[in-house]
Amino acid sequence: MKRMLTLLLLALALAGAAHAGEQNIDKVLGSIHVDAGQTMGDVTTVNGSIHLGAGATAAKAETVNGSITLADKAQAHSLETVNGGVDLGAGARVATTVETVNGRLALARGAEVLGKLSNVNGDIRLDAAHVGGGIETVNGDITIGAGSHVEGGLLVEENDHHGWIRIGEEHKPRIVIGPGAVVQGTLEFRRPVELYVSDRATIGPVVGATPVKFSGDAPPSG
């Protein structure tokens, strides 16, 4: 209960950041770097990357063509890009959603996303991290690393629903749930996948795939 209250207060604080007098940064061309420890409002660009330094705080961070990086213990209300990956450093936190179309999503040890983590194309990797609103992809491989915790389940959508079919191949996403990882909620697969689940992981019901159990730190390489 104490943990839930702490996370709720974090979400409310970050949601109101842009209305509390913090400076917004809005660009069309060029990357944005928020220095360590700074507090900003909305941070947006069109063609450029966004980097929040260690311990920095922002409300919305959004770009179209570019990556988004949160250094260790940085915080934001939401992150969104179209063509670019998202990297969360150790202990970084996002109060709502993290979303990209074409790009990888990587959460370092202790990173936290309280809402949904989603993309269409790009690998998704958690390293002892927490996602509170589920994970969704179409073509991405997913690795729920050792000690990670996902609430809200997993969803791998049919690629023909999105028009993002990889030309010349039928990619079969590889889903790995590592030792000590917990996935609460339904794991639903609406297209063929390779699903590997550690014999020391805890998962919810599986729809659309047959889990292959493995021992040790990782399944055999494919």
Image (spheres, grey):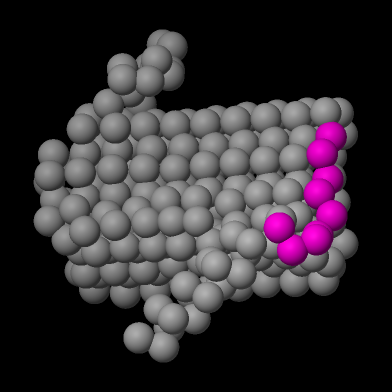
The front one of 178 and 16 is: 16
Quarter holding residue 80: top right
Q: Quadrant of the C terminus?
A: top left
Query: In the image, 91: left or right of 160?
Result: right
User: At which x and y percent is residue 25?
Assistant: 83, 45
| Residue at 60% in and 30% down | 82
User: At which x and y percent is residue 105?
Assistant: 54, 47
Query: In the image, 213: left or right of 79?
Result: left
Quarter holding residue 18: bottom right
| Start-end of magenta stretch | 19-27
The front one of 185 and 173 is: 185
Is 180 contained in the magenta span? no
**Image vertical order of residue 127 relative to residue 96, above or below:** below
| Residue at 35% in and 26% down | 171
User: At which x and y percent is residue 51?
Assistant: 77, 52
Q: Residue furthest bottom?
A: 2
* Residue 167 in view in this figure: yes
Quarter holding residue 56: bottom right
| Residue at 39% in and 31% down | 139
**Image vertical order of residue 89 relative to residue 190, above or below:** below
For the stretch drawn in magenta, the main secondary structure is loop
Is 23 contained in the magenta span? yes
**Image vertical order of residue 65 relative to residue 196, above or below:** above
User: At which x and y percent is residue 17?
Assistant: 69, 62
| Residue at 50% in and 51% down | 97
Query: In the image, 112: left or right of 44?
Result: left
* Residue 212 in view in this figure: no
